[in-house]
Amino acid sequence: MSSNGQERKNIQPGVEVDIVLKKDQVSGKTTRGIVKDILTNSSQHPHGIKVRLQDGQVGRVKKIYIK
């Protein structure tokens, strides 16, 4: 099951997500990883909540994988 990455309440550290990196915004290519930090302070964002993955990559959440 997956969820919307535009709302902060759906995301917490340790969750598996697909993000779009800044360099991939034009192509829309996604990168999968585990959330380490949530970088967006507002409760929602139209382009997706910005997060840092455990490997250090930063991008906006497009898809959340719920176990």
Image (spheres, rainbow, N blue to C red):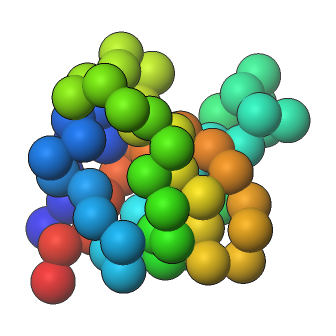
Q: Position of residue 52 (x, y in %)?
A: 60, 58
Q: Position of residue 11 (x, y in %)?
A: 26, 56
Residue 61 shows in the view: yes
Residue 32 shows in the view: no
Residue drawn at x 51%, y 71% as measured from the top left: 36
Residue drawn at x 65%, y 34% as measured from the top left: 28
- Nearer the observer, 23 or 45: 45
Is 31 rendered above or below residue 36? above
Q: Quadrant location of residue 49?
A: top left
- Nearer the observer, 42 or 7: 42
Is 21 rendered above or below residue 31? above
Q: Position of residue 39 (x, y in %)?
A: 51, 44
Is 8 rendered above or below residue 45? below
Q: Residue furthest front?
A: 41
Q: Position of residue 24 (x, y in %)?
A: 78, 37
Q: Quadrant of the N terminus?
A: bottom left
Residue drawn at x 17%, y 73% as measured from the top left: 66
Is 8 rendered above or below residue 56? above
Residue 65 is left or right of residue 16, and the answer is: left
Residue drawn at x 72%, y 43% as measured from the top left: 21
Q: Quadrant of the C terminus?
A: bottom left
Q: Residue furthest top?
A: 46
Residue 32 is left or right of residue 27, and the answer is: left
